[in-house]
Image: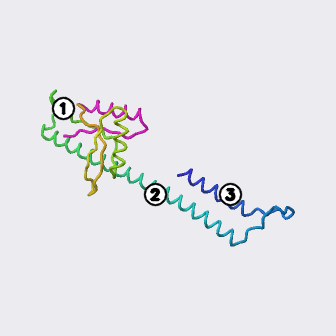
Amino acid sequence: MIAVLASNLLMVITIIFLLTQQPDTNNPADKPAPTENDNRLFLESKMDQMNRQFEQSIGQLNQQLEQFQVSLLDQQRQQTSALLDLSENIEQKGGDLKKESTETTTSAHWHVNVGTFSNNEAATQLKKQIDAIGYQAEINHVSLDDKIVYRVQLPGYKDRETAENTAREIMDKTNLNGLWAWEGK
């Protein structure tokens, strides 16, 4: 965003510089100076072009922000669900936090959330990227606040530590960040 603004500012300064230059009247090869109307049209054209570039940049940033908000909402919902499950579990056990049996801890209910998207195309692209580095990602459709979102996930981990280790491995191998593990049913 800053690079685009700097580029636009440089273009404006260049335009102003070119418009303030006077032709050498002693050199017959110089063309006649542009009229005030020509200068105005030229400036309007350049300003329109810069405006379109600026609006395009803002549109891209808004799209990225929307993706980030959807992902954040998804993470919050998962965390709230996990906290409610934990609270329910504590109540059922009467506050006694005993270690779970081997059967429960070896069940493969942990997942790695790689990304959450508002459109299927972006989710499919990420799935292909994850599959290409040797993992088997899947796309799940979920409704969040009356909107369908697409989660790219890696299911089937036996415990949180294994899922988190996989998330770290993927972040190390790619330019992705913010992967997180969660326990599903």
Q: Residue at x 46, y 57 (%)?
A: 59
- Residue 129: x and y, percent? 38, 39
For mark 2, give the secondary structure: helix
Q: Is residue 4 left or right of residue 156?
A: right
Cα distance, mark 1 to mark 3? 65 Å
Cα distance, mark 2 to mark 1? 44 Å
- Residue 112: x and y, percent? 30, 37
Please, what is the three-letter code of the amino acid marked with disc 2? Gly
Residue under numbered circle 2:
59
Query: Toward the viewer: 141 or 159?
Result: 141
Residue under numbered circle 1:
107
Disc 3 crowd, CA 10 A, few/some/many (<14, 14-19, 20+)? few
Please, what is the three-letter code of the amino acid marked with disc 1? Ser
Q: Is residue 82 above or below residue 59?
A: above
Residue under numbered circle 3:
14
- Residue 36: x and y, percent? 71, 72
Query: Toward the viewer: 151 or 33?
Result: 33
Q: Residue at x 43, y 38 (%)?
A: 175
The answer to which quarter of the image holds residue 159 is top left
**Numbered badge on residue 163:** none
Disc 1 crowd, CA 10 A, few/some/many (<14, 14-19, 20+)? few
Tell me where the magenta segment starts and ends, as one range: 159-185
Q: Residue at x 49, y 58 (%)?
A: 56
Magenta-span inclusion, residue 184? yes
Image quarter (top left, top right, bottom left or bottom right) of the C terminus? top left
The answer to which quarter of the image holds residue 23 is bottom right
